[in-house]
Amino acid sequence: MRRGLMAWDADEIPIAALRQRVERLQIAMVQANQDAMILYTNFVRSGAVSYLTAFSPYWADGLLLVSQQGDPVFATTLSKRVGSWIQSVKPIGELINTPTPAKALGERLATQAKMRRVAVLELDHFPSGLYGELAAALPDVEIIDGSESFAAARSTVDTVERRLLEKADAIAKNALEHSPEFTDVGAAVGAVEMHARLHGAEEVYVAIASDLDADRRFIRLSGPRPLGRRFAIRATVAYKGSWVRQTRTYASNNNDRTAIARADTWFEALLQGLDASRSLYEQIGAAVATLPDAQLVSWIAEASLGTNPLSVIASSGGPHETARRVSALTLTVGLTIGGMPWWSAGLSPSMGVRE
Amino acid sequence: MSSAVIATARRNRLLQSMAEADVDLLVVYGNAWQGDYLRYATDYGILEGEGLALIRCDGNTTLFLDSPLETERAAVETSGIEIVYAPAMLKEVESILERSGNSHIGTAPKRLMPQRLAARTKDLGLTDSTTMIDRLLMKKLDCEIAAMRAAAHMADDGYQVFRNAARVGRVDYELVAEVEGFFRAHGVDDNFMIIGVGGKEVRGMAPPMGKRLKPGDLVTTELTPCVNGYYLQICRTLVVGEPSPAQHTAFSIYRDALEAGLAVVKPGITAADIARAENEIFRRHGLGDYVTDAYTRVRGHGLGLFVDTKPHILEDVTTPIESGMTMIVHPNTYHRDVGYMVLGDALIVTATGADVLTRTPRELFSVPAN
C-alpha cells in the first residue's frame, strides 16, 4: 500500500509534459484506428496511468479514458471524500468517483458519435468485472487490445522522466548507505526503508539476502534476526511514479569489502556504457570477462513498459533482446568473484530513446 | 505461532470447503492490493506483478508468478506448494484449464479475475467461488486470531512511535518513515497507513502530501501493521499543543460512538446494527449529516489477510456478525467545529461480545507545540 510522499509539483512534472505524453498516445491511437483507449491502474499496476497523469492510487483502483483528442478522464473506486486530494496530485483531466468506473466511462463513450473501436491496455489482464461493465455499456463497439499503441508512445524518455528516475535512484542509493554497519536484519532493512521514505520516496520495497554464503536469493525479511558475514540488500524505490532498483553487497571482512568496491566500480562503468542498440547479453558477457576472478551468475534488465512499473525486457535466462524500445533501464547483475557472492543493481543513464 | 502452521490450517479448511462445494480445481488470483485470496491458498504475500494459484482437491497447489523476483522470493517464503515463474502466466494457466476435462473449476475473486480467463467461463465451465472464500476470510480460525493478537501489539507500539515522531516542524512523511523503520526492525513486513494534518480544512486522511506540522493541527492516522499476513488496525487523533475545549468536546462524541459500537458487538446482530449504534451518537448531537457518505466511507470494516475486508460496517450492510470475526469499529468522520477526527479499535467477536485487541488509551493525545 502506498504510504510515502504523494504530492504533485508543477516544476517537477509540468502539465505540458503530461499533455505531450497524452498526445503521443493519441497519435499512436489514430495510427492504429482506435477511437479511445482505457488504461487500468491500482497501486501494483500504476505504471501507465502514472506516466500520463502523474497519479497513482494509494488504494483501490481506477481507469483512465484517453480519447483521440483532449485531456483524459479518470474514473476511480476511491471515494468522493478523497476527490479533492486526487485532484491535488493529478493535475490533468477530469475526475469521476464511482463504484463502477468502467460503466461510467463506457456510458460516456456510448454517447459519442462514430465510436467503433475501443482499445484496452493489456486486455488479457484487464479485471473481468470491469470488462463486463464496459462491454455492457458498449454493446456495438469492438473492444481490442491497445498494448502496441501504448508501447509505441511509451518508448521515449523525456527530460521530466529522466529527472524523476535520477531522483528515485539517488534516494535508493542514499538509503542503502545506511545499512553496512548493522548486525541485525530488522535494523538493516528498517534503516533502508526509513531513510528512503525520509527523502521522499513514494514507495519502497526492501528485500534482503541475509547470508549470501548460505543462500543468495532475496526475500522480504524483518525483525531481529542475525546477518551473515556477507549480505545484500535490494531497495526498489518509487519517486513520483518513477521506479528503480538499487542493490548493494555488504561484508564484515575488509578483504571482501575491497573486492566488493572493485566490483561496484566495474558495475557502474557497465551501466554508464550500455548501448541500447546492441545485445545486452553480449555487452554484459564481454564486461564480466574484464573483471578478474568473476563468474556471471545471472542478470535481469527491467523497464517500464505498460501497467507494471518494472517489467523484465531481457535476462540471462532469455529473451536476449536489445533495449531499443524501452524508455529507461534498470539492470541487476549477480556474480561470484573469487568465491564471494556479489549482487548489484542500478539505473543505466545511457539507455532510452531521448526526445 | 509460525506462518507455516497457520497456512496448513487454512489450506485444510479451504480443501474442506472445496469438497463441500464440489470444486475439483480452484483458480485464485492475487496482487499486492487484493492479495488475501491468494495468501489464504498459498501463504504467499505478493508484492510485484500478479499471481495465479491452482489448488487441486487433493491439496496439490501450484503458484504461477509473472515476476522472476517474486518467484525467487516465493520459493523461499512458502512451503508445500509448487512455484512457477510464468512470464506468459495467463496462457499457461489457460492451457492447464483446457486440459482439465470434466473438472468442476471454481475461480476467485470474481471482479479481478483476468479477462483472458474469464472470457472462457462458459466453455471451460468456470464457476464463481468468491463467496466461498469470503466466508473463510471473515470467520477466523483460532490460529489466525492468535496472529492478529500479535499484530495488535505492534499497532499499539507503532502508534507510540508515531506520537513520539510528531512535533512542530516535521513533515508528515517523516512520521510515516519513522513508523515504517520501527515496523521493519520489529518483524512487521507490511503496513497500511494514511494520515491527516491540519484543521477544519482537512476532510479525511490520505497518503502524506508534504505537510509540515504546526501548533493547533489535528494529526490523524490509521496504522495497520501486518504480522504473518494478518493486518490489524488502530485509529487515533492527536493535537499539536494543548487541545482546545472545542476539540475535547468533539472528541468525546467519537469516544462515545466507538464505545456504543463496541457495546452492541455480539454474534447474531448485523453489521448495520454496529453502524447504527455509532451513528446514533452523532445524530443525538445534531451531527447526522456527518455520518453520510459525503463525509465518511465506512464506520468500520473486517480485518484479516486484507486491510479492508468484509463486512463493511454500514447501516445498509446486513451481513450477520459471527463469533470468530475480526474487525475494527471506527466512527471516523468530519466534525464541523474542529475538522476530521478518527478513533478506532480492533476486536474479535466472541460469544460474549467484543474482545478488544488494541490497548492504546482512547484519548485525544497531544504533543508539545514548542
Image (tube, rainbow, N blue to C red):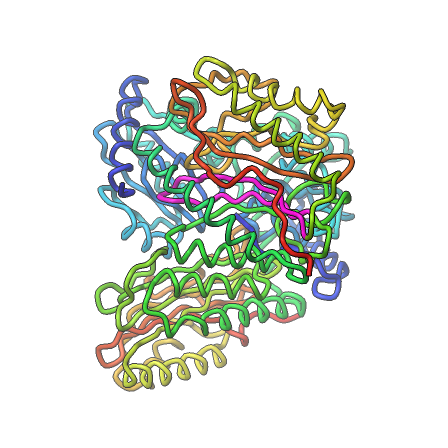
Toward the viewer: B245 or A248? B245
What's the residue at 64%, 31% (across, down)? B254
Residue A200: give x, y in percent of width and height.
Answer: 59, 63
Q: Is residue A213 left or right of residue A160?
A: left
Quadrant of the frame with the C terminus of chain A: bottom right
Magenta residues, as a range?
A: B218-240
Vertical relation: B61 (above or below) A267: above
What's the residue at 66%, 19% (across, down)? B280
- Labels in figure, total: 0
Q: Is residue B111 left or right of residue B21?
A: right
What's the residue at 39%, 65% (across, down)? A188
Vertical relation: A88 (above or below) B39: below
User: Magenta stretch containing residue B305, yes or no?
Assistant: no
Toward the viewer: B114 or B42? B42
Toward the viewer: B194 or A45? B194
User: Magenta stretch containing residue B221, yes or no?
Assistant: yes
Residue B85: give x, y in percent of width and height.
Answer: 33, 50
